Amino acid sequence: MTRLLERLSLTQKVSIAALSMLGFLAVTIIVVTNHSKREMLITNAQELQRMTLRIQANDLALAFDNFSYQIDADGFLVNVRWTEIPDFESHDLVDQVGVQSGQTNTIFRYDAAQGEFVRLTTNIVRPDGTRAVGTVLGAAGIVHQAIMRGETYAGEALILGTNYLTIYVPVYDAGGALNGVLYAGVQIDTINALLHAELINVLMLAALALALAALIVVFVTRSALRPLGAVNAAMQAIASGQHQTQVPATGLRDEIGAIARNLESFRDQLAAAARARAASEAQDQARNAEQAKQMRVQQRVVDDMSRALQQLSEGDLSAQITNPTHDPFPTEYDALRQAFNGVSDKFSETMQSITNVAEQVSNGSGEITSAASDLASRAETQAATLEQSAAALNELTESVRSSAGVAKNAATASQDNRTIAEEGRQIVADAIAAMQQIEKSADQITRIIAVIDDIAFQTNLLALNAGVEAARTGEAGRGFAVVASEVRGLAQRASDSAREIKSLIVESSHHVETGSSLVSRTGQSLEQILQKAHEVSDQVNMIVVAAVDQASALGEINSGVNQLDQVTQQNAAVAEESNAAAMSLQHQASELMTELEKFKLTGRSATLGTNLRNAPRQQFESSSIPMRKRAAGGGTNPRLMEF
């Protein structure tokens, strides 16, 4: 590898280093983005599972009076109580929850005989297309062990050969004994499919950006270093005695331009020396030795300049033309040496300034990454909390709307009861009037019976007198005596019947009086009931008005919270993008400092190498801490199991 690099030009080395840096940067960004996206998808899926369990618990509470639950600060169901879990003939409840949340959900009941939790109702489908009703949780699995300890399990699980991200919540009866489990989950393949689609998009964008960056790097590198190669070629030509060679890049205002201008001045001096040598060569052979010495001096200058330029082209910014005491640099060309050394020092100082700026960028990007990570974490937490609040507010709105409907029905029923009570009061009033008429008729009948009894007494008396008179008349009054006897018997029977009727009438009068009293009391009770019905009807009407107003106000609040939820979700997405951009900037700064380490600067090599090796890595590690904390806090350690 070293020999191969030695054969490459400076342009090729810089291009390869830049392309390698871009490739490493692209791979790093893709890996970090993919990991962050997966963590975010898992966090969102777990929040959706908690919401699914809340929806399921709310529907169960509405359907069963013996079901109750609580929700802790993290949105998990706690203290789930179900006195007796029934058999489910219909699966509409779990299907409706699945439609609302898009996730699978199941209700288990504990079978003490089997020692297993059995699925009573679920929307999980077997590979053959049937529901997984009747299957068991699996006593050997880690979920069963966690539930038996009374713990809520959250993590990955293998259900019917398919990986799921799940949450299992224990259910207790009224005595606190474990009797069931509530479950919610989503297939891992669904999350992986979303992640794969996002990864394809990121790879396409990264490939496009990498290709564009490669073109820019190659173009900029060649444009920047092309004059240095031309200057080196001109130096070689001048060293070979071609004093008419044009020196390129003399119009540039950078260090390469200064070297070219100094080389041009050196060429002119060589040309003048050559002309002077040619003019004096024919006149004085004695000057040959001096000229040869001058040529050696010039050759020495050319060799030193070529060597220094070669070092500079290879990235050694500490290249200097030395002036040792045992072999001093020619005095007449010392200005050229000082000019080259000055250019090298200037270039080294410039690269040192670039290094310092890169370190500052790295430090700043580390702080930006940390702040962006904290912002993203807070935005995700706020978005999850607001989503939970929006879901709870939706449930409350539906509950108030349902209560308003029930209150309206109660008001209608109360009005009907009021109408029926008024009709009953009228019926009781008619009954009281009828009983009073019956009492009057009974009194009249009693008087009539008294008259009949009196008539019977008088008739009996008259019949007795008639019998006495007939006895006095003797045989002639015998027939009349018989008639008188019959009349007397008839009068006696009429008197007995009148007494019996009177007794019955008196008894009936007592019964009628008692019934009249009871009917009167019933009328009074109905009057009180009617009065209370009026009050209840008025209170129910007031409740209906208040419930309608509450439902309207909650609807407006719900709309505002949903809009705020959308804005918060968008802010969380922007925070994630800012975090990714800050991390990308930090990676670029780190790679830039790594590339700068390849340059050898005058008097700073050891310190610069140490800084370049340590500073970017420390900054990157410190900036990565919030991301690791967020990943550890937001996600769960997936635990694969089979049951």
Image (cartoon, helix red, strand yellow):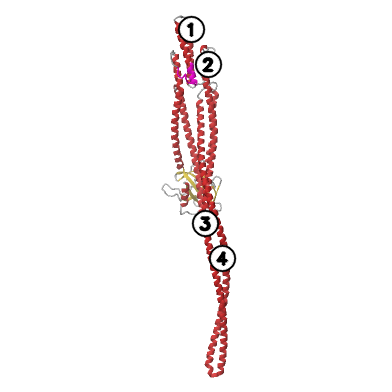
Q: Which residues are magenta?
A: 247-262
Residue 49 sits above or below residue 419 on the image: above
Q: Which residue is mark 1?
A: 290
Q: Which of disc 2 and disc 3 is earlier in sequence?
A: 2
Q: Which of disc 1 and disc 2 is earlier in sequence?
A: 1
Query: Does residue 379 appear anywhere in the picture?
Result: yes
Residue 474 numbered mark, or none: none
Q: What type is the residue that disc 1 sits on?
A: Glu
Q: Position of residue 4 (x, y in %)?
A: 44, 23
Q: Which residue is mark 3?
A: 408
Q: Which residue is mark 2?
A: 338
Front residue of this view, candidates 245 and 168: 245
Label 4 Cα crowd, 10 Å radius (few <14 / some 14-19 / many 20+): some
Q: What type is the residue that disc 2 sits on?
A: Gln
For the residues marked 3 and 4, what is the alpha-carbon distance in whole angstroms?
Answer: 25 Å
Residue at the image position 51 percent from the left and 15 percent from the top: 336
Residue 607 sits above or below residue 162 on the image: above
Label 2 Cα crowd, 10 Å radius (few <14 / some 14-19 / many 20+): some
SS of the residue at dot 3?
Answer: helix
Q: Is label 2 in contact with label 4 (beta carbons under 8 Å)? A: no
Front residue of this view, candidates 73 and 272: 272
